[in-house]
Structures are given as structure tokens and as C-alpha cells.
């Protein structure tokens, strides 16, 4: 399936591949076998109508292959394997992201909402039909007027004691449900999120099971209406649409009542007293969407890099170093920078995703399911999903450009995957807003520490308040001092590649950034609301950047932890270079911060770029092995330029010129002729 | 056509709009009127077959509207207006980039090659049919095996004295012409680039007029073959394809012989003795492609920013500062950073493009057409096209994300424009390679200065070789000293916004970077070829970054020059803030360089971010005016979210809640109820 490139010095591709497959390796392999089947592949150039039909048909193939039931209760035919379910789901992205996300709508959102927010009775009633696709359904949360601010949606579900029904109602145009998968065509039912109102009190957002269409006629039920969202930038195999409800009545028991119930008399009760905590608990059960997008984004990045690096190792262009042979693209420094830096980030994101998936499985299997575990999971998912989905878009674009015009042909995948993955950056939580969630958590942790600790720790948090501090008081001093002492670029590079130095630099940056914003905001809570909001807003950019720094550190830590799993020494050495490239790449990206805040001397900072360039040349011989370890075969890549066709073309061309030279029939170049004439005239 | 937003403090949108329209304002207005017609608009969701047919039909509309003949000779019905021709062409991007590029293939490449590389006889023979679209044609330069390295294409045109014909031949698969517009379906003829061989000498790349298809049957001529490139990431209104030639014979006189001729006996002659200079002169006549992509990229960025900023000024989300009213997106600091920084760059790119277009017109009108002028034009076009096309992709992505899910709907233009413009980054010269051309020119200039100057100037170029120099010897010292003296953030900000400080910082960076690479490479020329190439490659990344720095400086200078054209004082003040945002944005982006090289103190560097944040709040009230000055109306935007629909939705929602509160029928929030109960129980 995957070519391996062996030499005496080569890394152990098989071992590395298994490590990357992670805990759910067997499930991933099964899912990749499924994703290899032509029947589930995206066909380019279909109209969105045709693509939707095809994707719906493909969902049935997933049901038949039992590819989508791993998370559901055992008593209903599932296997209650939450981690495996997500792992298998992620791998579908190589077949067609529309198929993946359409499956996500049906089973990961619609089905999961019934499972996590409903009672056992609800599960028994609806899950079998959802699992079998007898009931295609929608997850009707987002409204035209409210995307990421779910708590503010305006659809209401008002309890009518007289009939023991909830009345679902859309009060105005901005409250229409929007961008809802399965809403335009296929959905027969939906889990609709609405403000639950009973006895004049609004108990916040709850979920209701609502019949959308008549299963026989496929017409909207009375009071239900909608619109087709039409063509999108990608994912056109999914029939996204809008929904609205005009006093639509559903039985009281259609409230998915795990976290909030209304009795026949209209009395509200909940196992969670705090409305805020209740809301976040309900929303938190749906975190798997973010987890799986993180994994899918990593998978797409791997596919893109395998294609581009394979091509760059065969494609020749410009002949700087020889008159007769052109250079392979991958030997150009700039090309290495473009591709290897993204390769390093992809490895980091892959190891980080594996940690996230384990955390997710720990919580949902019940193995480690405290409030704190759930909060950690939320934060981790928000942090990693943001970075990996942006990274995938960046990687798909850079790899596309690195393959020039052939990268733009849809057959070579980049443009198609990029169009489909574009929305990953803003759905299941807008990345910018997710990073603000992360930042708030960091601030909350900081505030806790701030309250309970002695001055020493406070000073450590606050050190960067003093302008132009030369070197701070922690472990880093030793490193910086070392440079100041010796002035040796060579030796300072050794220190920078030291794991502890990288960790210290990355960790301190997060702490210092959080402390700086925390300090600026610490009195805001005492101010009037508008004033406090204004101060918060003045630091919004810093907050987002602090969260990003935190997420980058999490990726780096995961990569470093991943290194410990490698047993083959050569593989470990090469992978450590890749980790160093990732770590130093982060330090280079934020170099101005390290300089401004006295964490790196000017002299030391100037060594970072050179050291990165040296890492590129070290990694170069192993680049193909590193992408082969991703384990995707031609049936997943499906890119003619990664099939070896370019090498055949190059060999044919080289052979032609070689034979021509040997035969003496090659025309002489005018430039060379002129040179000879010049030399001849000089002799005369 | 365009809404204006007036207040006492508002800027003069009309004046600014005219300045942005520039020297060819009237032509641009005419072209925008044309681009406003529904018949030329892109229809989303067509198959690529349907889209191609539509685009071909639209070309005829352009002919009828006399929109595409401005560059052609007056004696053939053109107006020899080169600047106006490109200006009008650029504006077509708002209608459909496929239409624009398809027109570019027909008249800007195929027609222009006949005009610039052919004799008057060639022009008289073929241009009328090209202009009328009687002869749809291709520009067959790029080969599968050679993209940006045109000098190395492998197609040959060998002169046969016996028949007085050239034999066009494709020796192997890599030499197939590829990605050629009009090649898959429409092209009846082509200008084919091939190595001209006569009497056993290869005189390098020349252009030949070749009949591709029989005008009656539309079948390929004998010996000509080809393939359809199929679906692409965008621009699917264009029938790109591949072409190959099996010993295809064309008359000797089909050589477009302006820069190189072969007489009947097979003797080659050229007005340009040097084969290298001859090649670059011939290629240089086709620079208008790069010029027009630069302008089109700027136009697309303007459209995207108008849509996103209009939406952000109406859309509300999250209510941090008030219980009843949510914030407008454009009031969030992060949102301002995302959009205004790109707005500033778009203004810079717009002014820079106007300078490029004038330079282009000067050369091609013959007003200023020395060798040096042509070289300057080449360098300027390469520098600006690279930055502006990348900027457009970045802007289209960021504006898409800034509009969330609605940004992903194809009806709101971002995703569609982004897909179409993707290839702009690598066609008409891969941006990375174009920047290397710029860098080579910078190095050549540096070498000249290096040879002729005294040690003082050399030292100025070489100052950054010394590690950790605190402050260099030029004008900047005064600025840096000022901060060191006072330590006042407020006052140092005043200095940073000073035009001369920005210029000095940006200029010195270019000089220092070029000097650093120049110094590293200065002995390479004496080394063996392979060794020299290796050293060059070790500095490739620095070279590209030096070129980028140069291009950014060009944009900044153009923006600064543009400010002098503004007469209204309020407009000038606001536009100066935007220029400062652009300049300080560049300095912030490269802050680590300024710190590492002692150009900014740590303390000063720490003020840059704050100053940028203050600029954002100053620009905020004028943001809509600044995008309205671009002058695009609803018929160009065609984005429902920029139509005012969002404001209507928000007003309707606010009105609903206002009335509900007034009526006393609003349900009480559970959180507030709990708070009241708590307070009541305390009293008890």
C-alpha cells in the first residue's frame, strides 16, 4: 500500500506508522480500508444536487459496513467505544469530506444529541432509526442571527400545560435555524435547540426532538418551513438549509430531558442547579464534533504533505548546479522550509490529537469523568481544533502552490480538500472564539493561583511587567548565560535544541502572556459592566495570542511525549530533529516576543534561523519516509502527481537528452557558439 | 451606486474614490458599468462544461462592447492605449474571474504575442481575427515539465531549408504544453513557444504561429494532439488543456520574428546579439499579464473587504457591555485587527498598482522605454504581483472567516473568488520565483554599488554583520535615542508614526538584508558551479525575504506618495492613520529583525502593538467610508450579507425584544430568578 524507502540510515517507517496510528490503530485501519473503496470517493464536477444524492447513498454504505455505530449503546447494537468511533470517523475525510461531515451530522450530532441529552426511553425510541438511517435528521442549533453564541439563540419552546405540549416558535427572521445539515432535503426529524420557557421563566437552551417532514410525502410538517442554503464554498454533498417554526407543537416528552425536565404541571427541575453550569454541561456532551474535526484536519494535512513531498522529490526545475541536470524541487532550501515546517507541525498536531482523543475517551467511557476532566477536555478540544484546522488550510494552500499549476488541477486533491475544509475553521465553534474560551480558562487558572500563592509565585507570573528585563529568574537564565559566556553560535545551537530549553521558552511565554493580561484585567470585574467590557476588549488580541501560545505548547508537549514511544534509535533521532524544527519554528515565529521580553539575547536570536536551516538539510534525506509513515496509499491519495508519473516523465526527458548528446546530433547552444567564436577571435 | 456615510467628521469619499480610480478613471468606470451587467456575471453551480460555454459567449459581449481592443494598433481599430487596456481588463474580475482570464488568454497573451513579437505583416494578417474572436487562440508556452523556467522548455522548432518550413515537435511527454487556456476546446490557433534550431544551432525560445484546429470541423490539424486539463480548483470557465506536436510543419514566415528571424536559407539574425538579453526582451513584452493580475488581485481584495466590513458593521454577537444589546462585530478589537490591517495593505497595494500601471504605460507607449525602464518595470511587476496576489488570497480567507457560516455560502462571493484567484499566486510566474528575480536584481544593484563606492558606503551596507550592534549610524539613531532619553511610550509612539521614521526603518531593513546576503554570496561566483549553487541555495530563504522586504517598501512608498494627492484635510488625516497602520504593521511583522539587528530597543518595540491598537480605534468610525471609497456597488458586490439584510434582521430582533420588555410579557431569566430568591432568603 505504501512505498517505503530504505537505506542503511533510514528510519523505521513501520514502527513510526504504528505509533502514529495510536491507540485505535485497528479501527483506523478498518476505516482506511473502507475509505479506499471507490464507492465512497468524491467525484469532482458533480452539481451540488448530484453530489448530495451521492453522499446520501454513501451514508447507507457506512451503515452496512457498521462504520458509524461504535459510540452507540451496546443494547442497541453499538459498542460504546467513543474513542474508536471518532478515530474511524476521522479517516473518512480522505474519501470525501462531504461524506464525513454528513455522517457527522447524522450520527455525531443528531444521534449523539438524542443519546447524550435524552433519556434511555428516548434512546430506545429514536436511536435505532437514526442508526439505520431510517430517520435522517438534523441538529438544529445555529441560527442566522447567532452562530457561536449559542446561549443567545432566540427560538422558544414554551410549555402549554393545557395540552402538555411544548410550542416551538421562531419569533423573527434572525432566529431561523441556518446552515443546518440535512435540513434542505433529507431530514425527517431534528433535535431543535430552543429557550425553554415554563410558568413565565426562561430556563435557558434545551433540546427538543421535532418531526420536520412527513416520512411518506417528504413534505414539511404543519408549521415547519425552510429554505435551501444553496451552493457553498465546499462540502456540497451536504444539503445545508434553514428551518423555521410557526407555533409547532411537540409532546412534553420530546424534551431531551437528561439535564432538565418539565413535569406535566409545568414544573421545571434539573440535576444541575446552576443554569450556567447546566448549559455548559449540555453543550459539553457535544464536544466530539470538535475532537473529530481536529483529527480530520490532521489527516488531510498528512495527505497533502505526502502528495507534495512525493512530487517535490521527483520534479526537477532549473539547473543551477549542473549544465545537464536540473535540481529536484525538494533540494531547494525555500521548498524545504515551506514543506518541512508544515510537516513538523503536522506531526505535532497528530500526537496532540492522539492525546485529545484519549482524554475524550476517558471522559465519555466514564474512566475519568469528573467536572475537571470535562473542563480540561473542553479546553484541550478548543485549543487543538483551532490550530489544526487553520494548519490544514495553510498546509493545503502551501502544498498546492508548491506543486504549481498541477497543484491547481482538481485531480491532485489540494484545491478540493481545501475548499471542503475551509469551513472547519469556523464551524463547531469559530476558531477565534474557541481561542477566547481557552484564554478565559487560562485567566481563571491564573486568578486561582493569584489568590492562593505567596509573593514569590506572583513575582514569577508578573516578571514581564518590568520593561526590558534582561534575563528572568527561572531555569532559562542558565541557557542565556551560556551564550553570553561563550558567544559560540555552534554551542548555543546545541542549547536551543535541548528539550528543556525549548520547553522553558515555550512555557514561560504562555505564563508571562497570561500574567500580563491577567494583571491588566484583574480590576475590571469591579468596574461597571460596559467599562469592564471595554477593558477586556482592549486586550482581546493579547488574549487570543496567549491562548494560541498555550495551544502551541500543548502540541509541543504532545510531540515530545510521542518521542518516548519510539524504540528505533535512528527513527528517534530523526523524529527529534522534526520536533526541534517544530519547537524552534515556534520560537522563530515569536522571536520578537522573546527579544522584547529579554528571554533571548540578540546574538542568540540570530542563531535560530541558521539552526532551522541546518535541521532542514538533516531532515531532507528522511522526508519521504516521514510522509510514508502516515500510511496513506494511492487509493487514499488519488493524486496523479503522487503516483510516480512525474519521475517517469523526468526519466524519459533525461534519457532523451542523454541519447541526443551521445549521438552527437544535439544542436549546439547559441550561447556556447558565441563563446567559442569569441575565444577563436582572441586567438587570431 | 455606492452608499456614503456622512458625519461632521467624515472623510470625503468622493475625492478619495477618484484618487483610487487613478489615471485611467474613465476607463475603469466604463469597465465597471460593463462588469455590472448580469450577462457577464458568474453563475455558480454550473458544470465546467456549462461554465466554459458561458465564458466563451461572454467574450463576444466584450468584443461588441469594444472592451478589449484598447492596446491594439490604431490602424486595426485599437487605440494603442496600454495602460487603459489593462485598467479596463482588471475591473472584469468582479464579474467573473474566468471571463477575465479567458479574455486575458485571447487578447492579453495570444493577441499580445502576435502584436509584440510579430511584424506588422503578422499583425495585419492575424490581429483582426483575434480581435473579433474569429480566431480564438492559445498561448502555448508552459510545458508539463517546465513551468516558471521558460528558457528550458523542450518543444523544438527546427528549420527545414528544403521546404522553408519550421518543424514543431514535442520530443517527450514532459514537453507537452500544459494548463493552456483555450486549448481543450476553443482554440483554433496558438502562439507556440519552442527552441528555434537552424543549421544545428539552438537560438533559444521563439514564438511561432500555429494552426491548431480546422475552423470548419474543429478537429485537430494533422500532427497536433491534446488533452483536456479537466476540472480545476477555480476558473472553470476556461478550457485549459494540453497540446503536443508531432513534426508539425508551419511556413517559415509563421515565426514571430521581431526579435529573431530566419531567412529562407536558414540563416538566423536578431537585433539583439546576446541570447540571454534577447530571451528576456521577448518575455518582457508579456509583462502585462503580471501587471493586470496585480490590479485584479487588488480589486478582489477591495470587494471582499467592502462585503466583510459592511457586514461587521451590522452584525451583532455577544453582549459583553450591556444586558440588552449585543456588540457589533466591528467593535471587537480582534475583528478590527483582522480586517483593518488588510484594509491598510489593500490601500497600499492599490496605490502601488497605480504606479506600476503608469510605469507599464510609460514603457509600452514609448514615453519612457529604455532598457533600464524595462528592467525596472519587470522588477516592479514581479515584486508587486507576488505580494498582491498572496494578499488577495489571505484577505478572501480572512473575510470569509470573519463572516462565519454566511461567509462560506457561495452567494456571498468570498469562497468563489478565492477559488478562482488561487492560481494567481503561481501563474504568470510563481510568486516565490518572482521574488527571487527581484532579489537577483537587488543583488545586482548592490554589487554595482559595492564596486564603485568608498568604504563609508560599504560600511553602511555592511553594518548588520556585527552582532548585537545597538543602534546604527544613520538617521534612525535620532529616533531610537529619543526613546532612550525620555522612556515615554506616548512620545515614542509619536516618533514611530513619523513618516521619516517608518521610511528609515523599512528602507534600512532592505539594504541590510541585501547587504548580508550579498556579502555571503560575493565570492560564490569564483567557485565551481555546483559549489556556488549550493552556497546560493543556503541563502535562498534570506533572498526571498529580502525581496519581500523590498516589495513591502515599494508599497509603503506608493501609499505615502498617494497621500500627497488628497486635498481634504480630514480625509488626509484618516488615510495617514491607515498608512501608519500599514507601516507599523510591517514593522510589527518583522519586529524580531529590528530587535536582533539593534534597530529598535526592547522598550520601543513594546510600544508598536499598543500604537497599532490605538490606530484601530481611530480608524473604526471611518471604516465604512474607507471601503465605500473603493466605489463598488451592489451590482459588483452581489453579496446578500452586504446588502443591508443583516441590519434589517438585527433591527427586527431588537424591536421584538424591546416590545416584549415593554409589554411585561417577557419570561424572566432563571438566573435572575435565582438571584432574587437568594436575596429574599437572606432577608428572611
Image (tube, coloured by chain):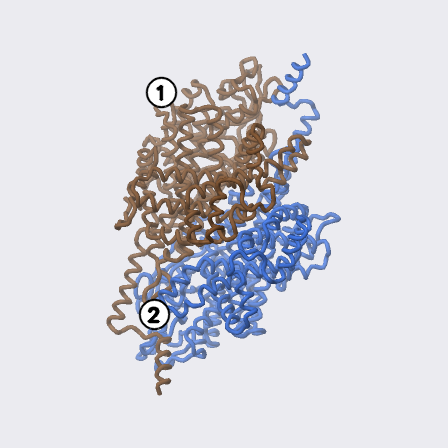
Chain colours: A blue, B brown
Residue A224 x %, y %: 33, 65
* Residue at 32% across, 32% down: B65
Q: Which residue is mark 2?
A: A156
Q: Which mark is residue B574?
A: none
Query: A236 or A548, which lies in front?
Result: A548
Q: Is residue A267 left or right of residue A577?
A: left
Residue A146 at what x, y percent from top left?
37, 62
The residue wearing badge 1 is: B75
Q: Residue furthest front?
A: B485
Which chain is mark 1 on?
B
Taking depth in this image into account, of A576 and B8 the one nearest to the observer is B8
Q: Residue B503 at what x, y percent from top left?
A: 45, 41
Task: Say what secondary structure mark 2 lies in.
Answer: strand
Residue drawn 69% across the image and 59% down it: A566
Pointer 1: residues within 10 angstroms few (<14), some, or many (20+)?
A: few
Q: Secondary structure at mark 1?
A: helix
Q: Quadrant of residue A135?
A: bottom left
* Residue A503, image x, y percentages: 61, 60
Nearer to me, A586 or A291: A586
A656 relative to A436 in the view: left or right: right
Amino acid at each position: 500500500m505504501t512505498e517505503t524507502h530504505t537505506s542503511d540510515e533510514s528510519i523505521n517507517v513501520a514502527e513510526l506508522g504504528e505509533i502514529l496510528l495510536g491507540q485505535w490503530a485497528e479501527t483506523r485501519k478498518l476505516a482506511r480500508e473502507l475509505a479506499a473503496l471507490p464507492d465512497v470517493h468524491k467525484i469532482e464536477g458533480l452539481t451540488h444536487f448530484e453530489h448530495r444524492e451521492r453522499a446520501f447513498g454513501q451514508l447507507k454504505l457506512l451503515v452496512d459496513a457498521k462504520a458509524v455505530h461504535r459510540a452507540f449503546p451496546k443494547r442497541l447494537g453499538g459498542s460504546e467505544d467513543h474513542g474508536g468511533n471518532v478515530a474511524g470517523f476521522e479517516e473518512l475525510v480522505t474519501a470525501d469530506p462531504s461524506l464525513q461531515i454528513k455522517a457527522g451530522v447524522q450520527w455525531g450530532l443528531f444521534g449523539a444529541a438524542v443519546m447524550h441529552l435524552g433519556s434511555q426511553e428516548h434512546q430506545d425510541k429514536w436511536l435505532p432509526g437514526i442508526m439505520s438511517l431510517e430517520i435522517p435528521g438534523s441538529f438544529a442549533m445555529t441560527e442566522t442571527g447567532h452562530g457561536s453564541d449559542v446561549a443567545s439563540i432566540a427560538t422558544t419552546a414554551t410549555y402549554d400545560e393545557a395540552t402538555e405540549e411544548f410550542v416551538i416558535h421562531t419569533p423573527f427572521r434572525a432566529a431561523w435555524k441556518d446552515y443546518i445539515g440535512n435540513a434542505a432535503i433529507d431530514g425527517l426529524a431534528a433535535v431543535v435547540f430552543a429557550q425553554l420557557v415554563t410558568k413565565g421563566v426562561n430556563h435557558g437552551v434545551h433540546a427538543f426532538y421535532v418531526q420536520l417532514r412527513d416520512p411518506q410525502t417528504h413534505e414539511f410538517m404543519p408549521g415547519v418551513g425552510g429554505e435551501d442554503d444553496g451552493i457553498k464554498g465546499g462540502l456540497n454533498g451536504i444539503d445545508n438549509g434553514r428551518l423555521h417554526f410557526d407555533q409547532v407543537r411537540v409532546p412534553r416528552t420530546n424534551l431531551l430531558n437528561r439535564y432538565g425536565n418539565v413535569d406535566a404541571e409545568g414544573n421545571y427541575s434539573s440535576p444541575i442547579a446552576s443554569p450556567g453550569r447546566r448549559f455548559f454541561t449540555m453543550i459539553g456532551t457535544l464536544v466530539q464534533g470538535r475532537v473529530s474535526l481536529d483529527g480530520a484536519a490532521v489527516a488531510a494535512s498528512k495527505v497533502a504533505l505526502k502528495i507534495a513531498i512525493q512530487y517535490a522529490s521527483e520534479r526537477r526545475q532549473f539547473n543551477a548546479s549542473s549544465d545537464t541536470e536540473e535540481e529536484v524541487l525538494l533540494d531547494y532550501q525555500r521548498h524545504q522550509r515551506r514543506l518541512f515546517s508544515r510537516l513538523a507541525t503536522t506531526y505535532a498536531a497528530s500526537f496532540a490529537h492522539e492525546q485529545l482523543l484519549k482524554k475524550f475517551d476517558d471522559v465519555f467511557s466514564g474512566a475519568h469523568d469528573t467536572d475537571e476532566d470535562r473542563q480540561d477536555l473542553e479546553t484541550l478540544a478548543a485549543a487543538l481544533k483551532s490550530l489544526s484546522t487553520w494548519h490544514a488550510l495553510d498546509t493545503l494552500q502551501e502544498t498546492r502552490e508548491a506543486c504549481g499549476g498541477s497543484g491547481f488541477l482538481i485531480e491532485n486533491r489540494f484545491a478540493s480538500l481545501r475548499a471542503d475544509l475551509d469551513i472547519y475553521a469556523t464551524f463547531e465553534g469559530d476558531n477565534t472564539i474557541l481561542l477566547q474560551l481557552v484564554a478565559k480558562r487560562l485567566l481563571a487558572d491564573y486568578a486561582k493561583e493569584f489568590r492562593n500563592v505567596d509573593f514569590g509565585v506572583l513575582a514569577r507570573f508578573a516578571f514581564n511587567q518590568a520593561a526590558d528585563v534582561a534575563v528572568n529568574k527561572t531555569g532559562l537564565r542558565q541557557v542565556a548565560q551560556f551564550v553570553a559566556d561563550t558567544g559560540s553560535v555552534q554551542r548555543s545551537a546545541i542549547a536551543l535544541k535541548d528539550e528543556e530549553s525549548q520547553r522553558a521558552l515555550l512555557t514561560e511565554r504562555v505564563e508571562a502572556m497570561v500574567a500580563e493580561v491577567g494583571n491588566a484585567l484583574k480590576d475590571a470585574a469591579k468596574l461597571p459592566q460596559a467599562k469592564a467590557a471595554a477593558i477586556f476588549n482592549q486586550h482581546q488580541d493579547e488574549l487570543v495570542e496567549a491562548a494560541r501560545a498555550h495551544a502551541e505548547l500543548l502540541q509541543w508537549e504532545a510531540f515530545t511525549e510521542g518521542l518516548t514511544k519510539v524504540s528505533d534509535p535512528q527513527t528517534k533521532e530523526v523524529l527529534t530533529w522534526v520536533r526541534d524544527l517544530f519547537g524552534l519554528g515556534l520560537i522563530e515565529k515569536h522571536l520578537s516576543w522573546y527579544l522584547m521580553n529579554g528571554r533571548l539575547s540578540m546574538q542568540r536570536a540570530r542563531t535560530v534561523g541558521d539552526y532551522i536551516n541546518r535541521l532542514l538539510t538533516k531532515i531532507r534525506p528522511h522526508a519521504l519516509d516521514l510522509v510514508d509513515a502516515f500510511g496513506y496509499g494511492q487509493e487514499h491519495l488519488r493524486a496523479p502527481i503522487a503516483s510516480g508519473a512525474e519521475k517517469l516523465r523526468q526519466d524519459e526527458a533525461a534519457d532523451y537528452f542523454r541519447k541526443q548528446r551521445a549521438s552527437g546530433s544535439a544542436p549546439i547552444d547559441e550561447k556556447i557558439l558565441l563563446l567559442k567564436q569569441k575565444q577563436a577571435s582572441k586567438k587570431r
